[in-house]
């Protein structure tokens, strides 16, 4: 499966959801996740993300490993998102901030 990591938090550009052939993305208030039960590993979403938040599970950086189980957990409770929409306010400012895990709203 593919995994959305920390860089997405408070940005949520949503370019990724438009290209997913199986509608695997699930939406929270300020973050998206990928449902590992639906993702077919096509990798189309990876280059779409302006902040490089999406990785193949085997390529998730060491300090981001918690996001693999977190995507699976939140995918069970969040609703599908299948169309691009406006990024969050201040997305471009938050895109430059690396340490924002505590900002994640469940
Ligand atoms: Fe969707 Fe493909 Fe990205 Fe998986 S890798 S979430 S199937 S676009
Ligand atoms: Fe998040 Fe990147 Fe998609 S910021 S919503 S993973 S395009």
Image (spheres, rainbow, N blue to C red):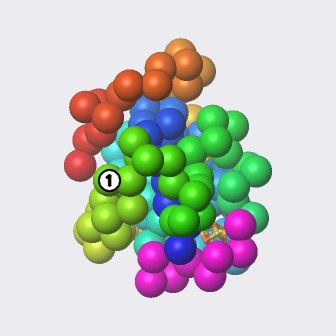
On the picture, is 30 further left or further right than 8? left
**Label 1: which secondary element:** loop
Dominant secondary structure of the residues highlighted in magenta in the image: loop
Does the magenta segment cover residue 42?
yes
The percent coordinates of residue 71 (x first, y second) are 37, 62
- Residue 106 shows in the view: yes
On the picture, is 30 further left or further right than 102? right
In the image, what residue occupies the spot 36% across and 28% down?
100
In the image, what residue occupies the spot 55% across and 19% down?
96
Q: Nearer the viewer, residue 38 or 52?
A: 52
Q: Nearer the viewer, residue 101 or 89?
A: 101
**105 w.r.t. 24: above or below:** above
The percent coordinates of residue 60 (x first, y second) are 51, 54
Residue furthest front in the image: 62
Residue 82 lies in quadrant: bottom right
The percent coordinates of residue 15 (x first, y second) are 68, 49
Specify start and end residues of the magenta stretch as a single range. 36-43
On the picture, is 100 further left or further right than 48? left
Q: Label 1 CB, ligand 2: below 8 Å? A: no
**40 w.r.t. 82: above or below:** below
Does the magenta segment cover residue 11?
no
Q: How many marks?
A: 1
Please tell me how crowded label 1 is: few (under 14), some (14-19), or many (20+) other residues with Cα within 10 Å: few
In the image, what residue occupies the spot 69% across and 55% down?
46
In the image, what residue occupies the spot 76% across and 50% down?
47
- Residue 83 shows in the view: no
The residue wearing badge 1 is 66
The percent coordinates of residue 84 (x first, y second) are 64, 52
């Amino acid at each position: 499966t593919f995994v959305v990591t920390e860089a997405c938090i408070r940005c949520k550009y949503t370019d990724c959801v438009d290209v997913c052939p199986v509608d695997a993305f699930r939406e929270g208030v300020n973050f998206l996740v990928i449902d590992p039960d639906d993702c077919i590993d096509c990798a189309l979403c990876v280059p779409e993300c302006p902040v490089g938040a999406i990785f193949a599970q085997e390529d998730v950086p060491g300090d981001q490993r918690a996001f693999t189980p977190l995507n699976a957990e939140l995918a069970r409770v969040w609703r599908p998102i299948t169309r691009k929409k406006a990024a969050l306010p201040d997305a471009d400012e938050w895109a430059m901030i690396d340490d924002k895990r505590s900002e994640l709203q469940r």
